[in-house]
């Protein structure tokens, strides 16, 4: 059995790690020319589901290295008014179901860990143009460089603009959701720590004004943990990786993201340079706590970018064949709630589990993939709906609805049982028995 994965992002590489460890013949085809291409973007939060899925995909030494070097996301999440009056604090214990599995991770470091030890399985400079199914049930991928590859299963892990999805499911689309976000980074230095509010530099925060918008912030402070791990003798030489390579080139920082309805932004907001976007967001924050405005204006302009929110339209189950999808290629969602990468890892762990069962001779490939697709479509589009729902709710102009939300948050803060019932993370094992 040979597995072809189109796309070397988080989900595709996690699946390749899981399959390679089980001696499955797996190959990843990535359009970028080098492993170091596209090592950029903000760091990400891996929640309980993302951490559990990643643990299942990585060999133990790589998981241990990830756990040792990933940043501490803080003590929990705080919901605050625009004047920085706390309405509710949700402890990490609730957010992780008591497991402590919540990590703030550098995309660069995570990508390097996911590539470690599988260099022979990853083929760069292979941009997939199309695939064709063959009479014997196999599938062949055709690449822009003229190369081809044939396997028993082709997995589209090629992101939100997936070419594999466009061929497999031409009726599936991504649509604008009506919101837009502007995000940036404030470096954590001795100077910024001196004035930045403790809660902002101490974890996750959602700031809610009277209506119409919201501000999210998250702290990323993994460099010291990585440095300590290297000092303690972190050894990944067996995987062709040094501890120093897990130190990305970005210092510790606070990520902030301001979101509002697209109609509230200028028409050209998506093309504005960083300084103009900073001025725009600062103007939107007029009347907010001055430290929040300062966080925006003192961020490095070259880290400030705007993005229009998009999400996948619902997809019905399709006839299972030798081609399937994972991650943003099928259930792309808004960045609100940070569910995208976590759901992609959930896909990778589940589909890898199914393929390994086939590899052991326990079940048929198409039956195993069909079971994966049914489960993935259910939880994947539940995540899409959750992300879109909160994006709409947090940017609503309905003042009464916002007041009701704040009243509920304060109730959760006053009544521990209500908070626990509302926010505790419940781990559901997605791995089915053999088909």
Image: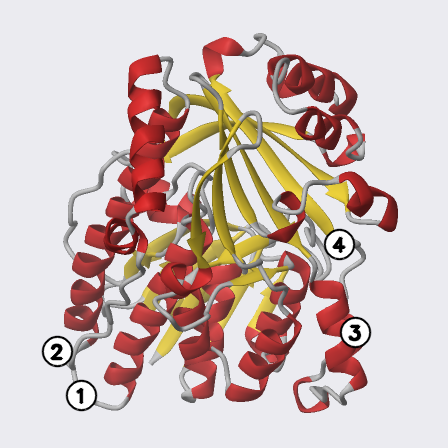
> Secondary structure beneath disc 1?
loop
Tag nearer the camera, 3 or 1: 3
Q: Residues within 10 Å of mark 2 (few under 14, many from 20)?
A: some
Is disc 4 placed on a helix, strand or loop?
A: loop
Mark 2 and mark 3: span between their CA atoms?
A: 45 Å
The answer to whether residue 364 is above or below residue 232 is above
**Could one spot residue 152 in this view of the protein?**
no
Residue 147, labelled with which disc? Answer: none
Which mark is first along the chain, 3 or 2? Answer: 3
Discs 4, 1 touching: Cβ within 8 Å:
no
Q: Earlier in the sequence, mark 3 or mark 1?
A: 3
Q: Which mark is residue 227?
A: 3
The answer to whether residue 82 is above or below residue 198 is above
Per the model, the C-alpha gap separating discs 2 and 1 is 8 Å
Q: Which residue is mark 4?
A: 252
Compare marks 3 and 4 and give the one earlier in the sequence: 3
Q: Secondary structure at mark 3?
A: helix
Give the vertical position of 177 relative to 110 (above or below): above
User: Which residue occupies 47% across, 51% down?
Assistant: 158
**Disc with the residue nearer the chain's start (4 vs 1):** 4
Query: Residue 109 at what x, y percent from top left?
Result: 67, 65
Question: Which labelled disc corresponds to residue 362?
Answer: 1
Q: Which badge, 2 or 1, comes first in the chain's sequence?
A: 1
The reply to whether dot 2 and dot 3 touch (C-beta < 8 Å) is: no
The C terminus: image quadrant:
bottom left
Considering depth in this image, is 96 or 89 the residue closer to the camera?
Answer: 89
Q: Which of the two discs, 4 and 2, labels the residue nearer the N terminus?
A: 4
User: Looking at the figure, which quarter contains the N terminus?
Assistant: bottom left
Spot occupied by residue 100 in the image (x, y as percentages of width and height): 46, 70
């Amino acid at each position: 059995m040979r597995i072809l994965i189109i796309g070397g992002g988080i989900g595709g590489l996690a699946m390749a790690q899981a399959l390679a460890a089980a001696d499955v013949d797996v190959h990843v085809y990535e359009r970028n020319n080098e492993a170091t291409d596209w090592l950029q973007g903000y760091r990400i939060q891996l929640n309980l589901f993302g951490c559990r899925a990643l643990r299942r995909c990585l060999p133990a030494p790589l998981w241990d290295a990830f756990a040792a070097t990933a940043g501490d996301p803080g003590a929990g999440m705080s919901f605050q008014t625009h004047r920085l009056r706390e309405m509710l604090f949700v402890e990490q214990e609730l957010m992780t179901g008591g497991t402590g599995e919540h990590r703030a991770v550098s995309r660069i470091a995570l990508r390097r860990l996911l590539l470690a030890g599988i260099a022979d399985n990853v083929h760069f400079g292979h941009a997939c143009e199309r695939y064709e199914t063959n009479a014997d049930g196999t599938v062949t991928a055709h690449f822009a460089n003229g190369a081809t590859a044939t396997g028993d299963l082709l997995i589209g892990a090629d992101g939100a603009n997936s070419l594999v999805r466009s061929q497999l499911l031409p009726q599936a689309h991504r649509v604008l959701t009506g919101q837009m976000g502007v995000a940036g980074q404030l470096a954590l230095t001795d100077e910024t720590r001196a004035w930045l509010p403790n809660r902002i530099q101490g974890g996750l925060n959602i700031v809610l004004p009277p209506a119409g918008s919201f501000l999210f912030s998250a702290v990323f402070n993994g460099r010291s943990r990585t440095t300590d791990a290297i000092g303690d003798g972190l050894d990944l030489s067996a995987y062709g990786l040094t501890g120093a390579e897990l130190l990305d080139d970005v210092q510790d920082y606070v990520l902030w993201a301001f979101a509002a309805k697209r109609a509230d932004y200028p028409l050209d907001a998506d093309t504005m340079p960083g300084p103009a976007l900073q001025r725009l967001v600062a103007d939107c924050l007029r009347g907010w706590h001055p430290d929040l405005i300062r966080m925006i204006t003192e961020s490095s302009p070259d880290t400030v970018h705007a993005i229009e929110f998009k999400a996948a339209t619902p997809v019905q189950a399709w006839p299972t064949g030798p081609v399937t999808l994972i991650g943003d290629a099928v259930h792309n969602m808004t960045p609100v709630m940070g569910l995208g990468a976590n759901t992609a890892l959930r896909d990778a762990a589940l589909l890898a589990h199914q393929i390994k069962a086939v590899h052991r001779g326990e079940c048929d490939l198409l039956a195993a993939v069909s079971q994966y697709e049914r489960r993935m479509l259910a939880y994947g589009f539940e995540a899409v709906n959750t992300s879109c729902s909160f994006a709409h709710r947090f940017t609503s102009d309905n003042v009464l609805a916002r007041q009701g939300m704040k009243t509920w948050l304060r109730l959760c803060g006053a009544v521990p049982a209500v908070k626990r019932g509302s926010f505790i993370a419940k781990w559901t094992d997605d791995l089915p028995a053999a088909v």
